Amino acid sequence: MRSETSLKILIIIFVFTFLPGRTLASYRFSNFKAHPPIYVYKSSLPSPKGLTPQKVKEVYNLPKSGGHGTIAIIGAYRDPNIENDLNVFSSEFNLPLCTKNNGCFEEHTIDSNTKSNSGWTMETSLDVEWAHAIAPNAKILLIEAKTPSGANLLKAIDYASSRKDVVAISMSWGGQEFSDETNLDSHFKSVSGASYFASSGDNGAGASWPASSPNVISVGGTTINLKNDGTFISETAWSGSGGGVSVFEKEPDYQKKINIPKNYGMRAIPDVSFDADPKTGFAIYKSGSSSKNWYVVGGTSASAPQWAGIQSLGLSVTLSNIYKDKLSGGSIEYFRDIKSGSNGDCVYYCDARTHYDFVTGLGSPMTINF
């Protein structure tokens, strides 16, 4: 039987063999800086293109309306136009207006001196608009950290965790794992029992934080294949989906129960998946200097807030539930098992397959009730 040290060595060998450029020697939480895994496929469009809320709900068997409690979106920097952008988006797709005045939208900036950043405002538009699209009756709480440093983002997470009304917390960003990450797992526990969702990343094979935390539902990426008339054909693994084995986090009990091969006693990610391919990307609205303010975007940045919306719809997306459902004889009722596609050349760790894989996890959603 392998010793704990031997297991850790095997994981580190995997990291350095398949993920060149990663260094673990001195990298710690104090060095962490998050990156939003978002890809702009088409920009400056006069009208919306890409996937619509209606089409996404058809693909994933989601209801047209619904939503309970508050969905917290954790982002960085301030977006001065987000309320306007959300309501242009809502009007376009016949969604309920979501404003500060009607109590649907709340913007909480951790530091009043927070500046704006064009890259992160694109991310904010994606997260807020699509969380609202999936769960239009839920409240949206946007929490803006001063910068994407680990310390500042953790302040935003802690605020969300302290809110009794929050049922889901979306973190559409990530970065390299670090040696002291296990000390931070307690931050992903809320007073309300909210579920945490994090993007698995867009650079192919490899684990990232906070998706690697055993208290966070890591969301990978897929490609949905549609006919010219929009009819769903199939869903495959997206080549950019992050995934792999954590170097530092031990395998949690919920994963032990489903017997994941070749994780060597360590945390495997992702847990679930959702469309993330920019070529099958999502329509978003972001204010600009012209009238051409529609974009088509993708990345696992899009996956996390939509799973947070699913949690708001059914209030049953927990790590314990989803792995228990996978073990059940009726797992097809809960997940579309993604069986083809890959995110790299690392063979077993990069290929989608039945049961569980390191690209799409347990699969994509087929219900709101887990």
Image (spheres, rainbow, N blue to C red):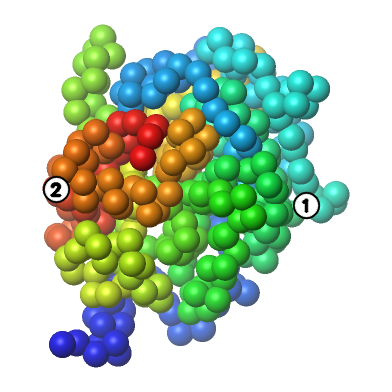
Residue 282, compared with residue 165, is above or below; it is above
**Closest to the observer, 81 or 128:** 128
Toward the viewer: 45 or 102?
A: 102
- Residue 108 position, x and y percent, is 76, 43
Disc 2 residue type (three-letter):
Thr
Q: Using the rendered view, name the quadrant where residue 44 is placed.
A: top right
Give the residue type that dot 1 points to: Ile
Left or right of residue 210, residue 166 in this image: right
In x, y percent, where is residue 298? 42, 35
Residue of label 2: 354
Q: Is residue 164 above or below residue 350?
A: above
Closer to the camera in the image, 366 or 320: 320
Question: Residue placed at 19% from the left, 87% from the top?
Answer: 2
Work out whether 78 lies above or below 97.
below
Determine whether, in the image, residue 207 is placed left or right of residue 102: left
Where is residue 348 shown, x and y percent of the image?
15, 60
Q: Label 1: state its secondary structure.
A: loop
Nearer to the camera, 122 or 366: 366
Image check: 293 left or right of 117? left
**Which quadrant would residue 335 be assigned to in this image?**
top left
**Sequence-wise first label, 2 or 1:** 1
Q: Which residue is located at x 45 percent, y 17 percent? A: 64
Give coordinates of residue 272: x percent, y percent.
Answer: 33, 47
Q: Secondary structure at mark 2?
A: loop
Q: Quadrant of the N terminus?
A: bottom left
Residue shown at 59% from the left, 19% from the top: 89
Q: Nearer the viewer, mark 2 or mark 1?
A: 2
Q: Is residue 2 visible?
A: yes
Residue 46 against residue 31 in the figure, above or below: above
Residue 110's disc is 1
